[in-house]
Amino acid sequence: LMPQYYADYLEPKTSQISHRIKAINRFIEAGYDVHVNFSPVIVANRWLNHYEELFKELNNNVNFEYKNIY
């Protein structure tokens, strides 16, 4: 996953990042093992803000019971 800001340029004509995040719960419920990869990490203007927004969206949309919290 990458912030939508970057995906618009680097992954044109693919599903929106928010749609991919929202699909995580459905995949887990269907019995799939889901892993999230954050590469490449793109360092540019406001990159920390973009990634913070991405991580917040991921946290807000994945069911708590599916998170590996230690």
Image (cartoon, rainbow, N blue to C red):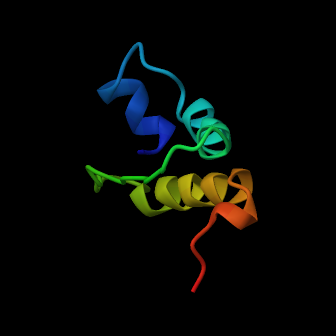
- The quadrant of the image that shows the C terminus is bottom right
- 35 w.r.t. 16: above or below: below
Judge whether 57 appears above or below 16 on screen: below
Q: Quadrant of the N terminus?
A: top left
Which residue corresponds to the image point at 42% horizontal and 26% vertical from the top-left?
A: 8
* Front-most of residues 18 and 30: 30
Quarter of the image for residue 27 reads top right
- The residue depicted at 52 percent of the width and 43 percent of the height is 32
Depth check: give the residue in front, 42 or 28: 28
Residue 19 shown left or right of residue 61 in the figure: left
Q: Residue furthest bottom?
A: 70
Is 4 located above or below residue 60 in the figure?
A: above
**Percent coordinates x, y for residue 46 in the rendering:** 44, 56
Please state if 52 lies on the left or on the right of 8 as rendered.
Answer: right
Relative image position of residue 29 (x, y in whole percent):
67, 44
Q: Please give the count of numbered marks on the rendered protein.
A: 0
Query: Image point 60% across, 79% down: which residue?
Result: 69
- Between 2 and 31, which is closer to the camera in this rendering? 31
Residue at the farthest top position: 13
**Farthest residue toward the front?**
31
